[in-house]
């Protein structure tokens, strides 16, 4: 099996592995997103998130939740392929797919030390902030200014007649 595929875990296996890493003193961060048409903004977000903890877990929205969040015609890339692309990034330790519209259930299950969002949020506006604070975790923001968006790339492609 390719090493990147070994990073993609079901939630129960992820929970087990994180427990073992925590017993060794490692801190855990969770980042999440759709990651459709992976771009440099995604890379900078995940690299920034990885700098804030010892272990970076990335939760990738499944196809149905991506469709609900992003609208018709999305996602462009199927969930399994998006998860594989994210797992191939050096900054990422583990990937888990999820079908909810937010990561509250995953946060409750794995209780990462940090929940990290991109710069389109502030620590005060992270939607799952209440869950993270309830179990004693922290919320942070990472990445560069929101200058890259998949929807902008799609619009450019449509405007050029290539999509």
Image: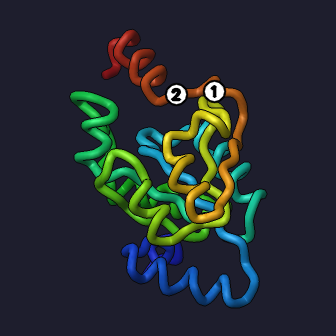
Answer few, some or many: residues within 10 Å of disc 1's Cα (few below 14, many 20 plus, some between 14 and 19): few
Is 49 situated above or below 162?
below
- Left or right of 128, for residue 113: right
Residue in the image at 60% along x and 89% along y: 20
The secondary element bearing badge 1 is classed as loop
Asked whether 141 or 128 is in front, the reply is 128
Is 99 situated above or below 40?
below
- Left or right of 62, for residue 48: right
Is 81 situated above or below 162?
below
Rendering coords of residue 3 (x, y %): 52, 77
User: Can residue 88 be seen in the rendering of this structure?
Assistant: no
Q: How many marks?
A: 2
Q: Circle 2 is placed at which residue position?
A: 149
Residue in the image at 48% along x and 65% along y: 95
Q: Are marks 1 and 2 in contact (CB under 8 Å)?
A: yes
User: Can residue 35 be seen in the rendering of this structure?
Assistant: yes
Residue in the image at 59% along x and 34% along y: 125
Q: Circle 1 is placed at which residue position?
A: 146
C-alpha separation, residue under disc 1 versus residue under disc 2: 7 Å
Instruction: Place residue 94 in its image quadrant.
Output: bottom right
The secondary element bearing badge 2 is classed as loop
Asked whether 47 or 99 is in front, the reply is 99
Residue in the image at 66% along x and 50% along y: 139
């Amino acid at each position: 099996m390719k090493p990147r595929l070994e990073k993609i875990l079901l939630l129960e296996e992820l929970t087990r592995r994180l427990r073992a890493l925590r017993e060794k003193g490692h801190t855990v961060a969770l980042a999440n997103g759709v990651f459709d048409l992976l771009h440099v903004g995604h890379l900078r977000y995940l690299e920034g998130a990885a700098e804030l903890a010892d272990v970076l877990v990335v939760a990738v929205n499944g196809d149905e939740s991506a469709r609900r969040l992003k609208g018709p015609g999305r996602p462009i890339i199927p969930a399994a392929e998006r998860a594989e692309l994210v797992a191939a990034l050096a900054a990422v330790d583990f990937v888990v797919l999820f079908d909810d519209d937010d990561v509250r259930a995953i946060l409750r299950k794995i209780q990462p030390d940090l929940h990290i969002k991109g710069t389109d949020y502030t620590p005060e506006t992270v939607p799952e902030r209440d869950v993270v604070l309830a179990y004693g975790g922290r919320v942070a923001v990472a990445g560069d200014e929101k200058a890259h968006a998949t929807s902008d790339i799609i619009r450019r492609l449509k405007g050029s007649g290539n999509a």
